[in-house]
Amino acid sequence: MSDHAVLHVKGRVLVGPDDVRDELWVVGGRVTYDRPVTPATESVAVEGWALPGLVDAHCHVGLDAHGPVDADTAEKQALTDREIGALLIRDAGSPSDTRWIDDREDLPKIIRAGRHIARTRRYIRNYAHEIEPDDLVAYVAQEARRGDGWVKLVGDWIDREAGDLTACWPRDAVEAAIAEAHRLGARVTAHCFAEDSLRDLVEAGIDCIEHATGLTEDTIPLFAERGVAIVPTLVNIATFPDLAAGGEKKFPRWSAHMRRLYDRRYDTVRAAYDAGVPVFAGTDAGGSLPHGLVAAEVAELTRAGIPPVAALSATTWGARDWLGRPGLTEGAPADLVVYEADPRQDVRVLAAPRRVVLRGRVVG
């Protein structure tokens, strides 16, 4: 498909959950709903149900279970996400410099959070800046300048002396750090499995919590009141039983805690959604999990009891709006995915895209 070709998408174009149109055209890599009047040198037609390119709101390109990866591996990760239709990625922490991806028209767009910021010896080796509270503001400022409008903290992790998950940062440190990020125009998110760190982080002004398995009936109303989003990463929470089994002998309290968080995962997500907490789809791919799991994550959200259209919004319309990126609006970059059936009726169709269109080009 050449730069001068016109792509015609026919069928049902889901501009929004209730805004359904019969067709759109792609001219010069951008969406238009006005039929082109100038004959194209080449015309390509695609038929089906079209959605904006999917969003994986918690992903790690350039990272694997051991730390940073080379460019070839990062490219394969991004291509795997592209194949499933994940065309916009919020990279929730990576030690790799993936800026070169921005120059590739054939790879998904990445919104970076810089590198994770963790407490010393309180996170996965080779992933994060590992620092103490006195340095938190400086490192948050550094990563706010390096990222694309986000900073990622590690809010809790196993404390080997306590033998369980505990909060990583004192309240005054996160208040000062989040204020500095906001001053620099960046939003802040945090990895949190457990209960203890959530109130301090939310009252300190945090914008999002990753995983959020520690939400309770006491903290869910606070999240709703403050508009703090969660990205549950349920495909990652599915690994908790294996993690718990591996740590049973050395950290029995931690293992039991992880099992409790796992057992109530669906109830937690549904209670948050019912209370009005914004919920978005993210996979946590790139650590121990493979890429290309966003369709599976949306299916998990529905298993938790989130209605199908809301689960779709968590990876399409709502997610793009939250991240400040356009969907299938007039003049927007033509990033879209076409399916054989209506994904509002059955989100499982997301696992089998008919066509993937990135920046106006059919790439899959």
Image (spheres, rainbow, N blue to C red):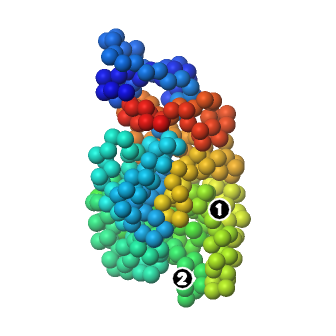
Residue name at image x 38 percent, y 80 percent = 132
Asked if 326 appears above or below 259 in the picture, the reply is above
For the residue pair 302 and 30, the one nearer the viewer reads as: 30
Task: Give the secondary structure at mark 2.
Answer: strand
Q: Is residue 68 left or right of residue 259?
A: left
Label located before the other in sequence (1 or 2)? 2
For the residue pair 122 and 334, the one nearer the viewer reads as: 334
Which image quarter: residue 220? bottom right
Residue 233, how many percent across, how many down? 57, 57
For the residue pair 219 and 43, the one nearer the viewer reads as: 43
Residue 253, how many percent across, how many down? 66, 82
Residue 363, how many percent across, how many down? 43, 36
Task: Give the secondary structure at mark 1.
Answer: loop
Q: Is residue 340 visible?
A: yes
Residue placed under numbered mark 1 in the picture: 238
Asked if 310 appears above or below 71 in the picture, the reply is above
For the residue pair 277 and 96, the one nearer the viewer reads as: 96
Residue name at image x 64 percent, y 68 percent = 240
Answer few, some or many: residues within 10 Å of disc 2's Cα (few below 14, many 20 plus, some between 14 and 19): some
Tell me the kind of residue under disc 2: Asp
Residue placed under numbered mark 2 in the picture: 159
Asked if 288 appears above or below 130 in the picture, the reply is above
Tell me the kind of residue under disc 1: Ala
Question: Which of labels 1 and 2 is toward the front?
Answer: 1
Q: Is residue 183 left or right of residue 125?
A: left
Distance from the alpha carbon under mark 1 to that under mark 2:
22 Å
Instruction: Farthest residue to the bottom: give it.
Output: 161
Answer few, some or many: residues within 10 Å of disc 1's Cα (few below 14, many 20 plus, some between 14 and 19): some
Q: Quadrant of the N terminus?
A: top left
Residue name at image x 62 percent, y 34 percent = 343
